[in-house]
Image (cartoon, grey):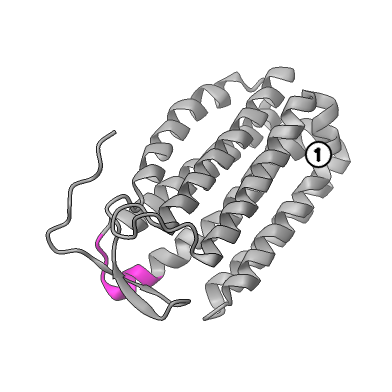
């Protein structure tokens, strides 16, 4: 894959933590654009492979959340926006993290936990996710660490379905979910520290974070695929 072309009039981005402006790195958003296409291409067969209504719904919600996260991120990071539109897109981009956490937990609740327990777990996850979305959309200047804690907390609530996933889809699926979660957390820590930052004008700390997200999401996709196959 070749690097995106150099923008003759680079977009200036603001880093609140560093309190400075910088040119948009050439690779910003490119990985998520690729993963958006890959998620859609791999997700459609996964939805088709689901057997019944609840199973199909759970997998479809997950695939929609996955494609939505990567698509929104790619549009936000690759597009040239007015200041107002950029703020809106930034909030949508960050909100999609919550949507993906809840979306990933949906097929686990419906296919692995199942029954009343699965419905209750899904209700708890959706309630937490909606609360996080409201917090982010309607409260200005939410601290980065607070939102990170909310995302991790939502992931821990979703982990209540892990024992059922382990029993239904096997150890590999369980380890993939745990590994993906660990990768998300590692990426979030690196993002907060702004490290590593190999080539700030081409492939900086934010692009490294996107690599973590792509690999973590791939782990979770593989786990959901194993769950669908086990059913």
Name the residue located 68 percent from the left edge and 65 percent from the top edge. 150
Q: Position of residue 205 (x, y in %)?
A: 44, 58
Name the residue located 65 percent from the left edge and 60 percent from the top edge. 151
The foreground one among 192 and 147 is 192
Residue lying farthest to the left in this orientation: 8
Figure label count: 1
Name the residue located 67 percent from the left edge and 20 percent from the top edge. 51
Q: Quadrant of residue 144?
A: bottom right
Q: How many C-alpha atoms fall within 10 Å of the one at disc 1: few (<14), some, or many (≥20)? A: many
Residue range in magenta is 80-87
The foreground one among 111 and 200 is 200
Q: In this view of the protein, can residue 84 be seen by the observer? A: yes
Name the residue located 60 percent from the left edge and 65 percent from the top edge. 133
Does residue 165 appear left or right of residue 58 in this picture?
right
- Secondary structure mostly seen in magenta is helix
Q: Position of residue 78 (x, y in %)?
A: 30, 54
Does residue 173 appear left or right of residue 190 in this picture?
right
Q: Position of residue 96 (x, y in %)?
A: 52, 55
Q: Position of residue 225 (x, y in %)?
A: 63, 25
Which quarter of the image is occupied by the C terminus?
A: top right
Q: In this view of the protein, can residue 114 be seen by the observer? A: no
Which quarter of the image is occupied by the N terminus?
A: top left
The foreground one among 179 and 136 is 179
Helix, strand or loop status at disc 1: helix
92 falls in the magenta region: no
86 falls in the magenta region: yes
State the residue position of label 1: 162
Q: Quadrant of residue 60?
A: top right
């Amino acid at each position: 894959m070749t690097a995106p072309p150099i923008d003759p009039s680079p977009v200036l981005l603001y880093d609140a933590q560093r309190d400075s402006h910088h040119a948009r790195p050439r690779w910003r958003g490119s990985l998520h654009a690729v993963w958006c296409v890959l998620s859609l291409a791999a997700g459609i067969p996964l939805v088709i492979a689901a057997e019944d209504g609840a199973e199909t719904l759970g997998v479809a919600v997950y695939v929609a959340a996955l494609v939505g996260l990567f698509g929104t991120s790619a549009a936000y990071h690759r597009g040239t926006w007015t200041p107002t539109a950029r703020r809106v897109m930034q909030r949508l981009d960050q909100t999609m993290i919550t949507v993906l956490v809840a979306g990933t937990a949906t097929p686990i609740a419906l296919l692995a936990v199942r029954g009343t327990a699965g419905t209750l777990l899904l209700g708890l996850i959706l309630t937490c996710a909606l609360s996080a979305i409201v917090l982010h959309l309607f409260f200005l200047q939410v601290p980065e660490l607070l939102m990170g804690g909310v995302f991790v907390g939502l992931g821990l609530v979703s982990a209540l379905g892990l024992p059922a996933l382990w029993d239904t889809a096997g150890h590999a699926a369980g380890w993939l979910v745990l590994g993906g979660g660990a990768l998300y957390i590692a990426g979030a820590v690196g993002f907060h520290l702004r490290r590593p930052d190999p080539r700030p004008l081409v492939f900086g700390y934010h692009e490294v974070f996107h690599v973590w997200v792509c690999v973590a999401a791939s782990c979770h996709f593989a786990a959901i695929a194993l769950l669908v196959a086990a059913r």
